[in-house]
Image (cartoon, rainbow, N blue to C red):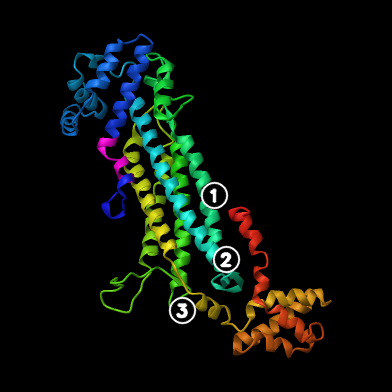
Amino acid sequence: MIPRYSRPEMAALWQPETKFRIWFEIEAHACDAQAALGVIPQEAAEAVWARGRWEIARIDAIEREVRHDVIAFLTALGEHVGPEARFLHQGMTSSDVLDTAFAVQLGRACDLLLAGLDRLMAALETRAREHKHTLCVGRSHGIHAEPTSFGLKLATHYAAFARNRVRLAAARAEVATCALSGPVGTFASIDPAVEAHVAAKLGLTVEPISTQIIPRDRHAMLFATLAVIASSVENLATEIRHLQRTELREAEEYFAAGQKGSSAMPHKRNPVLTENLTGLARVVRSAVIPALENVTLWHERDISHSSVERMIAPDATVTLDFALDRLAGVVEELVVHPEAMRTNLDRLGGLVHSQTVLLALTQAGLSREAAYAAVQRAALQVWDGGGSFRDRLAADPVITAHLPDAALDDLFDPARHLRHVDRIFDRVFGAA
């Protein structure tokens, strides 16, 4: 993670100060539980809380010698606790501390991401309702299809992020487990009650069975979920980038006073924020394959997953947190051009109403094959020579034999395409 794409609160979760504080709380809560069981003196547990301190520089110095991060931490902690430090880490193994702390960090990271999703969804709903009836052209294969509304476009993305929120909440619950089961996970040297106490204190659930580590399929699901959210970010960012193209100019990123778009061309107003989001989404998705490969470990434990997680966890969560915040800002300040949308909608002389005419002809008694041929014949004339689709249809005796002028006029009313917009909005946002 780099400062350019980091927000302070999420970045702080992965700093040594936060990690060691969680390690300390795991050890101290475990001492409380051990004292309650009579395994260690109550005074020892109290001493850990009262005198528990450490210096990161000292931990680093010890680790350079012992080459073991947990031992280095316990040694540095013990220098402050004093003789009672011999009761620290009773019956525990390093993974008990590492995996449980990692679960706490991932849970807190998910909470920040959930808050980011909430802000983005709120922005999307606000702008969708604002443009509920703002007509624009819908495109398939990049080609004009039929009229829609810009509000419906945004509602589609809102629904995607609503699904993502459900997925992330489920992934958070799945990954937030505590394991204090000792070497190879048999509880041979520690009572399961200690694990339950620590889990309750840290807001975690108990891992039903840990082989000395928490199973990594839990983590793989979380990183896969982050990747899906990142893809949804890119999907919306790409839509905005397309709409900002000079040939469309239907919507564009806010361009602040004093902002410059190009070092060479003063006229440029580039979609730099959404282009940036497209790139950041790739970074988040890159964590998925390593996370999946971490599921396979040797026997009850190895540490091939450790180096991977030290990199992908901060990078993926910090990057996605930044991306959600940036995208929410883009949506909140998005500049929308309804006039350009209407101009583009009318650019093909009414061809976007071809299906409406086709269906009306079949309702009037013409076979679908004959109706399709007649409508396409008029449409191709407009494609090749321009002009009005409505006029081309009115000049075709096959069509006018089934549809009088008044009926044709009604078929070219774009409001027909929005007559169910309220029902769709109720489905997406809930009935008012």
Q: Quadrant of the C terminus?
A: bottom right
Q: Which residue is mark 2?
A: 132
Q: CA distance from mark 1 to mark 2?
A: 21 Å
Tag of residue 163: 1
Q: Are marks 1 and 2 in contact (CB under 8 Å)?
A: no
Q: Which residue is mark 3?
A: 247
Q: CA distance from mark 2 to mark 3?
A: 24 Å
Amino acid type, mark 1: Arg
- Label 2 neighbourhood size at 10 Å, few (<14), some (14-19), many (20+)? many
Give the mark nearer the N terminus: 1 vs 2: 2
Query: Can the viewer see residue 3 in this picture?
Result: yes
Give the mark nearer the N terminus: 3 vs 1: 1
The percent coordinates of residue 264 (x first, y second) are 26, 77
Direction from residue 40 to residue 397 in the image, left or right: right
- Label 3 neighbourhood size at 10 Å, few (<14), some (14-19), many (20+)? few
**Which is more toward the observer, 429 or 21?**
429
